[in-house]
Amino acid sequence: MPLDPATPARTRPTALVTGASAGIGREFARQLAARRHDLVLVARDVARLEELAGELRRDHGVDVEVLAADLSDRDALQRVADRLADPSRPVDLLVNNAGYGLKGRFLRNPVAVEEAAFDVLTRAVLVLSHAGATGMVERGHGAVVNVSSVAGYVASGTYSAAKSWVTVFTEGLSTELAGTGVTATALCPGFTNTEFQQRAGIAKPGPGFIWLDAPDLVSTCLADVAKGRVVSVPGWQYKTAVGLLKVLPRPLLRRGLRPQGPGGRARRRR
């Protein structure tokens, strides 16, 4: 997959980014536009997508398509899948970034709320990866980036379970894609400075060094994609954490994550 900023306009690659209106998705859109990718931006907030699209067209001279969709809605998800599968408008890079966390414990949340989050975090990744990678394999080039989380390496509610699925799914997809010219990469960030914490009502925990900056995170991921890496873990602190989490006994991890007191625990993203 070409990532050269000097790519001429007539051969510019196209990237589709979900959850592009804010946070990590917005940063992917900006960096890819700077690298001369045309873009398809997907999110629920049309106004924010249009604002970003105008910025990217103005600053980088790329073509930007806005596709409003709530990925928990199956009809809307299918519209995005159809866009990915359109052979007349090929997509060279898919970034499955859309996602959100839930406050409160699993048994205290309405099951419909949990199901909607599950659909965005897992089903959308499956459906869009299938639609995108199928066309890429036929063309012999492309890349899929599925944004997971270091939370997937621990057992801490439905969010971490979903992210564990995303990482393992991406590893399996990468194996299936071997030799096709198409790659799959699971991006596993830790705490990242974005709007997510404010939207989820999560106070910033821990010391400042554990927080990643979105621009560095995205540039690291794109470098790993170019190298064909299957799992991208930005930041020395999270590379160390993931290494430890892989060897610590699971019962010990579960004991450390038991909730203290009767209150709910906020789920965290990335």
Image (cartoon, grey):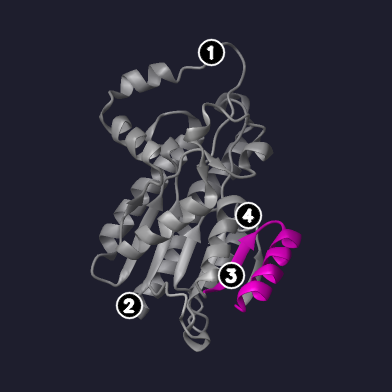
**Front label number (3 vs 4):** 3
Mark pair 2, 3: CA separation: 21 Å
Residue that carries the numbered disc 3 in the rendered image:
40
Q: Secondary structure at mark 3?
A: strand
Q: Is residue 251 left or right of residue 208?
A: left
Mark pair 3, 4: CA separation: 19 Å
Residue that carries the numbered disc 2 in the rendered image:
140
Number of other residues with Cα within 10 Å of mark 4, as a class: few under 14, some 14 to 19, many 20 or more: few
The residue positioned farthest toward the top in the image shown:
261
Q: Which residues are magenta?
A: 37-62
* Residue 15 x, y percent position in the rendering: 51, 70
Mark pair 3, 1: CA separation: 43 Å
Residue that carries the numbered disc 4 in the rendered image:
73
Q: Secondary structure at mark 4?
A: loop
Please give the name of the residue rendered at 44% of the width and 73% of the height, measured from the top-left corner.
Answer: 92
Q: Is residue 98 left or right of residue 68?
A: left
Of the image marks 3 and 4, the number of the one nearer the N terminus: 3
Q: What type is the residue that disc 4 sits on?
A: Asp
Is residue 9 at all visible to an observer of this figure? yes
